[in-house]
Amino acid sequence: MSRLRVAIQKSGRLSEPSLALLQNCGLRFSRSKDKLFWYGKDFPVDLLLVRDDDIPRMLLDGVCELGIVGQNVAREVMIERNGGEGLDQLRALDFGQCRLSLAVPEGSAVQSAADLGGRRVATSYPGLTRELLAARGVQAQIVELSGSVEIAPGLGTADAISDLVSTGSTLRANHLVEIEALFESTAALFGRAAELPADRRELFARLLSRLDGVLQAAESKYVMLHAPRDALGAITALLPGAEHPTLMELEGDPDRVALHAVCREALFWEHLEALKAAGASAILVLPVEKMLA
Ligand code: PRT
Ligand code: ZN
């Protein structure tokens, strides 16, 4: 029987959320702690656990059909290997958010990307940095480093860095100031749809449909509330992304109804307070575990 292979990061920031996402799609694996290959038990999808940088390469080489990796890494490998082409982003995911940013030492005369012409920029993302600077009309000298990029300016080997930032505390600890974000990144599911052998297409579509269900369910909430009939218009207008709510009569109270709806967007306290102000009461918000449209 045909099977699919999905590559995820073995150990790092993306490992746990990637595995959790696949498990939420109903995938179970016979795992062995140190082995790189986990066999899919109930669903014919196997897992490859590798370094994140290897994932786009393995996809390009046809070693696996799907991979979860940061857009930053996918883009860098595509630039390096394939003129920026080759992988399809199938779904953006809600983890691994960061940005590739330019940073300079505190007090530097460099204040924007435009000031970097001819200067040295240290980075682990040479292709992406060169491309994004070129798009701004800037030609800098790229100093490629595999790690600890943030110490390069202090060592005198670069005038600026182009590195991943999430909270910014690493920059601050190294007395660097972020001057410009070049690229916003998130983890994403990548593949090469056009290269997929015919015998695996149905399985691929089934996995993507489950994934969509999980992604939608994560954003969705099931809302139940009581509302005066004459406030129904105002109340439904306040429910973000809720189509076709269900209405039920309240026994012994003809002027009020129970309303149930699935909201496809985040529901914040402000939404609940606005619902209450519009006349809703007994408001309950429940998580949605699975969805299949
Ligand atoms: O071993 P392997 O090669 O698989 O792992 P790795 O060390 O290359 O990757 P890993 O696990 O550090 O990151 C994997 C992916 O997570 C990256 O490619 C990004 O897509 C994403 N990501 C999200 C980040 C960050 N946030 C992040 N903050 N990757 C790295 N960082 C670094 C940042 O550069 C800084 O040095 O983490 C440090 C802390 O950041 P601040 O801004 O919070 O201080
Ligand atoms: Zn890596």
Image (cartoon, grey):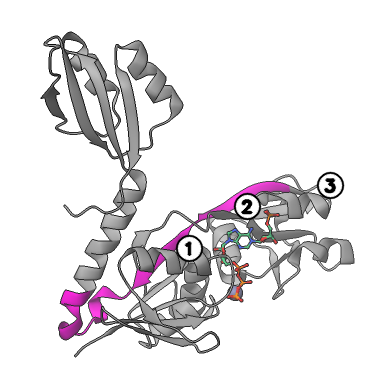
Q: Which amino acid does label 2 sit on?
A: Ser
Q: Does the residue labelled 2 lie within 8 Å of ligand 1?
A: yes
Mark found first going from the N terminus, 2 or 3: 3
Q: Mark 2 = which residue? A: 166
Is 154 left, or right, of 244 in this rendering?
right
Q: Mark 1 = which residue? A: 17
Which quarter of the rendered image does ligand 1 occupy?
A: bottom right
Labels 1, 2: front one: 1
Labels 1, 3: front one: 1
Residue 172 counted in the magenta span:
no
Residue 241: horizontal and vertical position, in percent?
26, 34
Is 67 left, or right, of 249 in this rendering?
right
Q: What element carries label 3?
A: loop
**Segment colored magenta:** 178-203
| Picture quadrant of residue 238 | top left
Q: Does the residue labelled 3 lie within 8 Å of ligand 1?
A: no
Q: Mark 3 = which residue? A: 106
Q: At 69% from the left edge and 46% from the top edge, which residue is drawn?
A: 179
